[in-house]
Image (spheres, helix red, strand yellow):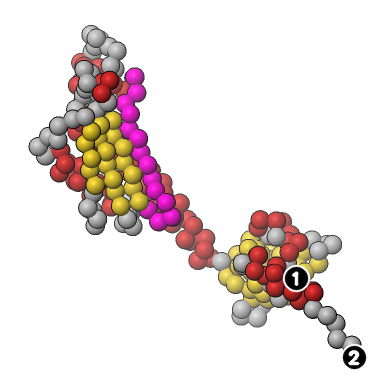
Amino acid sequence: MLLPVQVTFRNMDTRAGLDDYVQREAAKLERFYNRISSCRVMVERPQKATSSKVYHVRIDLGVPNGELVVKHIPSLHGTLKDVKQPKSRREAEAVLAHKTPKRAIHDAFEEMGRRLQDYARRQEGSMKAKQRLQHATVQEVFPGEGYGFLETEDGRTVYFHQASVLEGHFGQLRSGARVAFDEEMGDKGPQATTVKMIHPRKQARSAALVDELPVRAK
């Protein structure tokens, strides 16, 4: 991992090699996403669970625009803590596994790996969507009929319907408004499938100032 991992242990002795184990598990996360900005890990044995030796693990991972958090608290089924005499070898192994901090850490990082993969896929999809969008200017808009035309930066005219305008901004569109759009070929030529107003509040203020300007007498 590019940044050092902050590890905290509570209500338990720091065992030899346990800190290094956390560092190795954290380093594996970079296989899923390479823009991790921070990683904090807390391993705790709750005081009420000192007899059963159940370990809780929390991972806070810093990513662009926020954090991903995993709180690994073994469930009743997962720990089998109420099973005094396991019915099978598998149940016995499950009880022993969740009584070790390494297993709890491993399970928590597995869950974080899954969440990080989902986050990376969403980020990739968002970036591709942004890359597809082009910029244009509203050429004409017909509020009563619910459609209009865009003039692209390369001089083309593209039709758009009010249903394609995001966030309900169709009523705010005026000739000259700047938008970002995606398009496809329709039956009558290119048409916008998505129209997103650029800086809608700023453009609305500018339009209001223009409307308020006094008309000069000829």
Q: Is 35 positioned to the left or the right of 97 in the image?
A: right
Q: Amino acid at mark 2?
A: Lys
Q: Name the residue that disc number 2 marks.
A: 218
Q: Is 85 positioned to the left or the right of 201 in the image?
A: left
Residue 138, quarter of picture: bottom right
Q: Position of residue 135 (x, y in %)?
A: 60, 72
Observer able to see residue 76: yes
Residue 167, quarter of picture: bottom right
Q: Residue at left 65%, top 58%?
A: 166
Above or below, 103 against 50 in this view is below
Q: Residue at left 27%, top 11%?
A: 83
Label 2: how many Cα within 10 Å (few below 14, some 14–19, many 20+): few
Q: Position of residue 186 (x, y in %)?
A: 69, 64
Q: Position of residue 41 (x, y in %)?
A: 27, 42
Above or below, 125 against 85 in this view is below
The segment highlighted magenta reads: 63-76
Gap between marks 1 and 2, in whole Å?
Answer: 23 Å
Q: Name the residue that disc number 1 marks.
A: 208
Q: Amino acid at mark 1?
A: Ala
Above or below, 139 against 75 in this view is below
Q: Is 128 positioned to the left or the right of 155 in the image?
A: left
